[in-house]
Image (cartoon, helix red, strand yellow):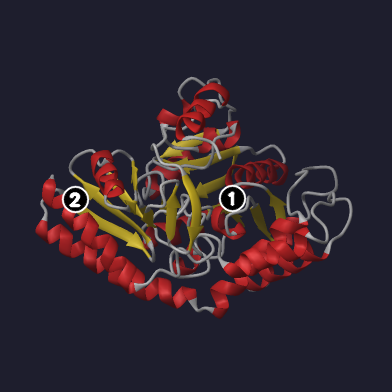
Amino acid sequence: MMKLREIFEAYDNHIVPTYTKQPLIFVKGKGSYLWDIHNRRYLDFFPGWGVGNLGHCHPKVMSAVRDQISKLIFIPNNFYHIPQAKLARELDFWTSSRFKVFFCNSGTEANEAAIKFSRRFGKGRYEIISFSNSFHGRTLASLAATGQEKYKSGFEPLPLGFKTVAFNNLEEVKAAVNDKTVAVMLELVQGEGGVNLAQKDFVLALHKLCEEKKLLFIIDEVQTGIGRTGRRFAYEHYGIIPHIITLAKALGGGLPIGAMLVRRDIADILGPGTHASTFGGGPVICKAALAVLTVIQKEKLLKNTQDLGEYLKGCLLKLKEKYPLIKEVRGLGLMIGVELNKNCNFIVDECIKRGLLINCTHENVLRVMPALNITKKQIDQAVSILDEVLFTV
């Protein structure tokens, strides 16, 4: 067992410092709780940027992984294997048999695949329109599509072919479209941008514009997908069918997977040799993802997300009435932002001291995204801690 000092020194001496870290060393997780090296328990209301839709170490996911890892861990994608076939079929069911899938390892890879697909589809058209405060990933093309300059600083020149326009502004989209435009990329709920919701009339008009101009409509569901908003995918709230959906985070139940789903009528544009991912859709991760989708359906977690999302939002709105510090509470399902009129890092730190893990994004927005199987009792516990912290500010 490493000592505390040895753990911190190992990170300092051997790991590239790309993350701002809390001085917490976690050793165990179960459901919505984590335990640190001192055996102190924390209620996790932000499990892995939305990775933990089932919380930590869900028994069905662990069982699926154990079963598969004893049979076949890896097989390259020039061969067939059963877990990938089953997962592809299940995702097809989840999207009402409208899409084919390309498997990769992360959200940024899924968005890179969507960008490459768009250029192949465009046959000379290559420009993609995205939105202010969006976040699409850290690799160069997905970074170029991201509408936040702070992530781009120091990495120029970025790939050409991307335009950023104001979120929820159809006129700016229309003005940006030209004969080189091939696609529009949109998060229906901007996570890293501050939990901002796309307006329904804007999305419907944007969808219509894409159909008229023969543009691909790419919906980035890396954070909103797999039940987070109370539907299987956030686009279902808007009554549209995109051309491409990108997924990652919650799909693997804690293991790394990404997926680009493309409408059937255009999917075969990417033929053999045009794109690949060495580890994409491997047997173990596909078995885990199948377990995730099964649990969400069998445990009726979409209904739980709808009901407890409303309950949690109501609790937070009561805090808004109590504390002028809170400017707005907004969100969809169990993806909720609490906007403050000051920096929220202090709030996060004080919550941690009291055993609650939440997130601060966009400097002044508390991002609250508990597991979809969260309970009312756990929500009450979290809100009580947040209330206590806000009272001290």
> Tags 1 and 2 in contact by the CB under 8 Å rule?
no
x and y percentages locating residue 89 in the rendered image:
73, 69
Total label count?
2
Q: Is residue 213 above or below residue 9?
A: below
Which residue type does callout 1 highlight? Leu
346 over 293 or under it: above or below: above
The disc placed on residue 279 is: none
Q: Quadrant of the N terminus?
A: top right
Identify which residue is drawn at 61% across, 46% down: 106
Spatial separation of the CA atoms under disc 1 and disc 2: 47 Å
Q: Residue 64: x and y, percent?
A: 69, 66
Q: Element under label 1?
A: loop
Residue 19 visible from this viewpoint = yes
Q: Position of residue 134 (x, y in %)?
A: 44, 43
Please give the name of the residue rendered at 47% of the width and 42% of the height, measured from the top-left corner: 135
**Tag 2 residue:** 389
Which residue carries the number 1 mark? 215
Residue 258 position within the rendered picture, expressed as x and y whole percent measured from the top left: 64, 51
